[in-house]
Amino acid sequence: MPGGLTQAQAYAAFADAIDNITKTYNDCGISDTVDAKSSYAGTSTYEADINASSQCTPRDEQNTWDAGDLAAGHLAVTCSWTVDGTTSNLRELVEADVRYNTTDNNFTNSPSSSCVNLYDIRAVGTHEAGHVFGMDHVSAAHPDLTMSPSINACDTSDRTLGRGDYLTLEAIY
Ligand SMILES: [Zn+2]
């Protein structure tokens, strides 16, 4: 698990990150009208279907968050699988997996004032949960949005969405 967390602590951190998306916690005072939902199915021996080169591998029909090795330079990766939608022209999500790269990076669940070179599990997780729920990256010209392509060490600001993140979720859900 990232940050040396126990499985229970990691679950709490991942759930918080996912809630930041489904409940659209934001910096802008916008109330949540997004219908995205999640539920926790329990611990598993399945692994995220993502290999050490950050490539998506064949899906196993389990939505899994875990930690392991990814391509250097990647803090975390989300792989998602979709099918043609039955009721709209949007794709329907059938599986999404998230892996933190704990081989090449160090993480923390609560960056302190002396934090150096540790990435915030929930900020990274909120960004990855954004991918799970169908959001792509915005350009690097919008560094304050959760879906900007990079994050600084010790930075927790991506735990809360910006207006652009919110509007994207609102458009999908
Ligand atoms: Zn990303």
Image (spheres, grey):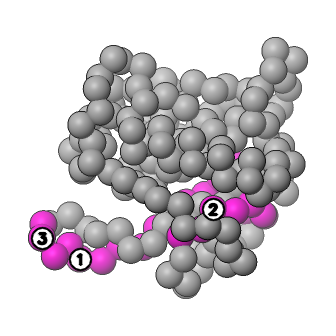
CA distance for labels 3 and 1: 9 Å
Q: Position of residue 145 (x, y in %)?
A: 45, 29
Question: Of callouts 1 and 2, which one flags the residue occurring earlier in the amino acid sequence?
Answer: 2
Of 170 and 36, nearer the camera is 36
Q: Amino acid at mark 3?
A: Thr
Residue 101 location, quadrant: bottom right
Residue 87 location, quadrant: bottom left
Instruction: Please give the label number shown on residue 84.
Output: 1
On screen, residue 171 versus residue 124, left or right, reads left
Q: Residue sitting at 61 percent across and 36 percent down?
A: 123
Q: Is mark 3 within 8 Å of ligand 1?
A: no
Query: Which residue has dot 2 on it?
Result: 65
- Looking at the picture, does residue 158 appear above or below residue 69? above
Instruction: Please give the label number shown on residue 87.
Output: 3
Q: Position of residue 125 (x, y in %)?
A: 59, 45
Number of disc labels:
3
Visible in this render: residue 131? yes
On screen, residue 141 versus residue 113, left or right, reads left
The boundaries of the magenta stretch are 63-88
Instruction: Please give the label number shown on residue 106.
Output: none
Q: Amino acid at mark 2?
A: Trp
Q: Amino acid at mark 1?
A: Asp
Of 44 and 90, nearer the camera is 44
Q: Could you tell me which secondary element the residue under label 3 belongs to?
A: loop
Does the magenta portion include 77?
yes
Does the magenta portion include 1?
no
